[in-house]
Image: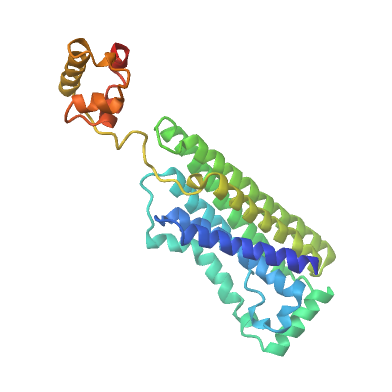
């Protein structure tokens, strides 16, 4: 019963995060959808085992098994997400959908499980829960293939991240490249921990020669940890999870050297001749008004490298 509560809470948490990311963001970028995809993978994984732990599989047996092969989605999602975080020119193209072909192939192989007769499906799940379902060589092979494909994607993503660190380290983005890479590395640690749990489980099942229902909860807990970590990060630093490539000061209005000299001359005139500094109630807005068309924010941003006129006030 405790497991069903835990899975139910985690599922609710994941759905909340997806709503928060997708529906509440004014700008839905590719990164938003990819992270939402990662959350969906974790939610579906927990939902499958929620059906087992709560006994609801007897009411909706057709739904069970929807999480099978989800590991094949994790690698492509992380790789594409890393590209959106580190490559300013990266945009979605439909050819990238080919990354998900292995999962679709696995889905097709599992069609007999999804269309199985209701009573036969319930009997299948009962056998699984009883610990009498054999762990076949084909099952071992499918799991090994999933692990290898996922690890390859992680390795390629790490190479891309390393390239970005070299090329973009000095670019003054609002969300610095170092922070992006640190976040991607943190995410990778959680994903690799998840894969490590699957490897340990695989070895254990090979030794036993049959499915052990309770053992599956190990990597389900790992997927729950990913969800809670994402939620924690979204609360503390939502822009880091899905940053754009806006550079610092790129929206500041540029003022030519000639205009700077003219504004400085006018400012010195205000201080030397009109003695604005003698007014005890002097405000920056009063100075801006004296400079007529000059906007205060433009003055502050454009004169950062020139002599500091405030010393004359």
Q: Left of 113 or right of it: where is 271?
A: left
Farthest front residue in view = 280
Display coloring: rainbow
Q: Is residue 269 above or below residue 141?
A: above
- Quarter of the rendering containing residue 50: bottom right
Q: Is residue 295 above or below residue 3?
A: above
* Residue 69 visible at all: no
Q: Which residue is located at x 19 percent, y 24 percent?
A: 290
Quarter of the figure with the N terminus: bottom right
Of residues 268 and 203, the one drawn nearer to the viewer in this rendering: 268
| Circle count | 0
Image location of residue 190, percent across then percent down: 64, 49
Of residues 19 and 144, the one drawn nearer to the viewer in this rendering: 19
Farthest top residue in view = 272
* Residue 102 visible at all: yes
Q: Left of 310 or right of it: where is 148?
A: right
Q: Which residue is located at x 25 percent, y 26 percent?
A: 286
Image location of residue 267, percent across then percent down: 21, 18
Image location of residue 92, percent across then percent down: 39, 57
Q: Which residue is located at x 30 percent, y 21 percent?
A: 282
Of residues 228 and 35, the one drawn nearer to the viewer in this rendering: 228
Of residues 234 and 262, the one drawn nearer to the viewer in this rendering: 262
Q: Left of 49 or right of it: where is 165?
A: left
Image location of residue 312, percent across then percent down: 28, 12
Quarter of the figure with the C terminus: top left
């Amino acid at each position: 019963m405790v497991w069903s509560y835990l899975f139910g809470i985690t599922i609710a948490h994941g759905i909340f995060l997806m709503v928060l990311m997708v529906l509440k963001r004014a700008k839905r970028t590719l990164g938003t959808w990819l992270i939402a995809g990662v959350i969906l993978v974790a939610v579906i994984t927990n939902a499958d085992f929620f059906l087992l732990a709560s006994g609801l599989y007897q009411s909706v047996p057709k739904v069970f098994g929807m999480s099978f092969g989800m590991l094949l989605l994790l690698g492509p999602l992380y790789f594409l997400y890393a590209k959106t975080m580190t490559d300013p020119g990266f945009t979605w193209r439909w050819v990238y959908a080919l990354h998900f072909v292995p999962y679709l192939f696995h889905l097709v192989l599992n069609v007999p499980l999804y269309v199985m007769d209701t009573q036969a499906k319930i009997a299948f799940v009962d056998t699984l829960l009883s610990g009498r379902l054999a762990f076949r060589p084909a099952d071992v092979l499918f799991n090994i293939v999933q692990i290898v494909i996922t690890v390859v994607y992680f390795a390629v993503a790490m190479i891309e991240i390393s390239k970005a660190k070299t090329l973009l380290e000095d670019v003054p983005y609002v969300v610095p490249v170092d922070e992006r890479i640190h976040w991607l590395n943190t995410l990778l640690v959680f994903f690799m921990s998840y894969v490590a749990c699957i490897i340990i489980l695989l070895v254990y099942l090979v030794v036993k020669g049959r499915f052990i229902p309770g053992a599956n909860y190990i990597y389900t807990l790992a997927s729950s940890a990913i969800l809670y970590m994402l939620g924690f990060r979204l609360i503390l630093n939502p822009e880091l999870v899905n940053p754009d490539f806006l550079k610092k000061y790129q929206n500041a209005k540029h003022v030519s050297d000639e205009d700077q000299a003219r504004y400085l001359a006018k400012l010195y005139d205000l201080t030397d001749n009109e003695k604005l500094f003698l007014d005890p109630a002097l405000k920056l807005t009063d100075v801006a008004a004296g400079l007529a068309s000059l906007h205060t924010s433009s003055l502050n941003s454009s004169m950062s490298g020139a002599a500091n006129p405030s010393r004359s006030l």
